[in-house]
Image (cartoon, grey):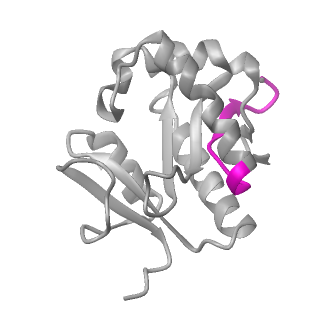
Amino acid sequence: MTTTARLTLRAPKPKDLSAFTAFWTSPRTVYMGGPWTSDQAVADFPELARQWDKNGFSMFVVTRSGDDAPLGLAGPVYPETHPEPELGWNLWNGADEGQGLALEAVRAARDWFFTQTRYRTAVSYINVANAASERLAVAVGARPDPDSACPYPPPVLIYRHGEARAA
């Protein structure tokens, strides 16, 4: 768990499943390979906990401090399909956008990741049509890294967080 002035970032809980499913079955996921079916979302949810168990890190559920209702996810993931850890984010409700919550959450998750693990760099894979995510990557200090390996079919923007990758 980690906190900011307004947010708490915590491990996923079973009670988050309904909000997770509602998000992943919605059009809000169009830039992330969605929308999914309810069955796909329910099947994928345990992967968040598996990542914590396997890697010692995973995406955090983002909540407002003092309110445990989930707002979205932010943080590192490292599925077997990825060549390196990815820093990802999403807000599950459009009403939460425009308040700097995602920026605050991503900064906190990134800083926790670099402080608590051996990793000093991570990437974000961003759909070329997702201008909001690209702006957020730039706002947290990520730099374009088009030469990095990518597990997704092109066109995908790749942004690097942290130290420059060794040549």
Q: Position of residue 16 (x, y in %)?
A: 68, 20
Rendered position, 164 above or below 82:
below
Q: Position of residue 42 (x, y in %)?
A: 57, 17
Residue 55 is a magenta residue? yes
Residue 86 is a magenta residue? no
Q: Which residues are magenta?
A: 54-67
Q: Answer left or right for 39 relative to 56.
A: left
Q: Is residue 100 visible?
A: yes
Q: Residue furthest bottom?
A: 167
Q: Is residue 4 visible?
A: no
Where residue 32 sits, quadrant-wise, is top left
Q: Position of residue 163 (x, y in %)?
A: 50, 78
| Viewport quadrant of the C terminus | bottom left
Q: Position of residue 131 (x, y in %)?
A: 26, 42
Q: Nearer the viewer, residue 17 or 101?
A: 17
Image point (72%, 68%), residue name: 115
